[in-house]
Image (cartoon, rainbow, N blue to C red):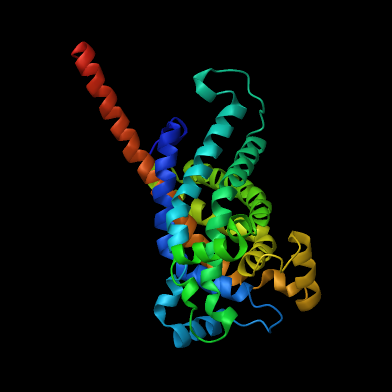
């Protein structure tokens, strides 16, 4: 697809493409995310390997345990990506002086600073959807391990039931939004790195390999962006997961969680589950960007056909 198709797309197209891409990516990698969360949420216990975690899940809870908690993110992750992709595009246009097609003076000229700022803005806005969704998801994913019975409590069976339980037991704000501040702290740097890495690698691939390898470039750039963002911000994700996995009040904020975890388990706690995050990152983000770019191409073709139809009706010419 030509490079300007996505950049010239209206905001609604970014929202649609982000929605579909987010849901597609989630279906690909949710089982890996479940293993990662289980490894991160082991508090005051010896670390276990990914293989051991997978084996324990299979033996104690069966294969469907790997998809536990998918309801909340399936509903929300499309919206998360829609918000993130739309925000990134509109902020980049604003900084370039292109918002609304006004052709005004750019607020920033350095393309790297523009990319970082657009990504950071995307991380900030999407956090307020992502935070509650990941709170519900994380509680479901660790429900069996936290009660230690080998069974999931009835109150945590299903996304809606879990969300209702959290709101009833802790109130809507604490029940759903615990860890959202930590989500903001993770998402701002993560998305800043994410979008800049994707754009940089994709443009380098286009320059080096040409349009004949466009799909391969999208896959490589998307997967690489996912890996780089986790390498840069993984300790923040560990803290976020711990805050969201346990009842409100367990930790008195982001720094308290970090210090308690460090004192109790040493610095290694901040890379616990990293291998699963990296294993998950490449296929997830490769599929997200490939889907997103494909949808943009389809929507661009649709817009062209609609415009041609309007011209025919008005002038009798295509």
Query: Which percent across, then down, holds residue 168?
Result: 55, 63
> 212 or 202: nearer the eye?
202
Q: Taking 266 as reference, is 169 above or below it?
A: above
Residue at the extreme top: 315
Residue 248, percent from left and from top: 67, 65
Give 39 or 127, whichever is nearer the viewer: 127
Q: Residue at x 36, y 45 (%)?
A: 294
Is residue 42 in sight in this rendering?
Answer: yes
Q: Nearer the viewer, residue 154 or 152?
A: 154
- Name the spot of residue 58 as percent of width and height, x first: 45, 84
The C terminus lies in quadrant: top left
Numbered-mark total: 0
Position of the N terminus, as image quadrant, is top left
Height in image: 246 above or below 55?
Answer: above
Side of 57 where 187 appears, left or right: right
Q: Is residue 266 left or right of residue 130?
A: right
Counting from the top left corner in percent of width and height, residue 4 is at 44, 32
Q: Is residue 254 left or right of residue 313?
A: right
Q: Quadrant of residue 195?
A: top right
Specify whether residue 219 is in view: no
- At x 78%, y 77%, the residue is 264
Q: Residue at x 47, y 44 (%)?
A: 82
Q: What residue is drawn where x is 67% and y is 32%?
A: 110
Residue, far left: 316
Viewer-proximal residue among 67 and 190: 67
């Amino acid at each position: 697809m030509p490079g300007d198709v996505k950049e010239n797309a209206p905001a609604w197209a970014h929202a649609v493409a982000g929605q579909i891409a987010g849901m597609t990516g989630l279906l690909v990698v949710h089982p890996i995310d479940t293993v990662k969360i289980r490894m991160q949420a082991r508090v005051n216990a010896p670390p276990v390997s990914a293989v051991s975690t997978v084996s324990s899940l299979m033996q104690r809870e069966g294969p469907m345990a790997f998809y536990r908690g998918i309801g909340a993110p399936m509903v929300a992750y499309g919206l998360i990506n829609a918000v993130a992709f739309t925000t990134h595009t509109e902020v980049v246009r604003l900084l370039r002086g292109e918002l609304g097609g006004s052709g005004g003076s750019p607020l920033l000229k350095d393309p790297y600073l523009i990319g970082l700022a657009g990504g950071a803005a995307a991380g900030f806005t999407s956090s307020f959807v992502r935070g509650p969704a990941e709170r519900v998801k994380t509680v479901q994913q660790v429900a069996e391990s936290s009660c230690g019975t080998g069974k999931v409590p009835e109150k945590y069976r299903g996304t809606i039931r879990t969300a209702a339980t959290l709101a009833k037991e802790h109130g809507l704000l604490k029940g759903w939004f615990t860890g959202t501040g930590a989500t903001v702290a993770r998402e701002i740097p993560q998305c800043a790195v994410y979008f800049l890495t994707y754009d940089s690698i994709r443009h380098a691939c286009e320059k080096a390999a040409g349009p004949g390898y466009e799909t391969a470039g999208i896959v490589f750039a998307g997967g690489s962006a996912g890996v780089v963002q986790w390498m840069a911000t993984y300790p923040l994700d560990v803290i976020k997961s711990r805050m969201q996995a346990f009842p409100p009040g367990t930790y008195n904020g982001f720094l308290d969680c970090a210090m308690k975890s460090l004192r109790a388990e040493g610095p290694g706690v901040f890379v616990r589950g990293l291998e699963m995050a990296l294993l998950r990152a490449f296929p997830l983000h490769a599929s997200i960007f490939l889907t997103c770019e494909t949808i943009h191409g389809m929507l661009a073709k649709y817009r062209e056909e609609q415009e041609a139809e309007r011209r025919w009706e008005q002038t009798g010419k295509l």
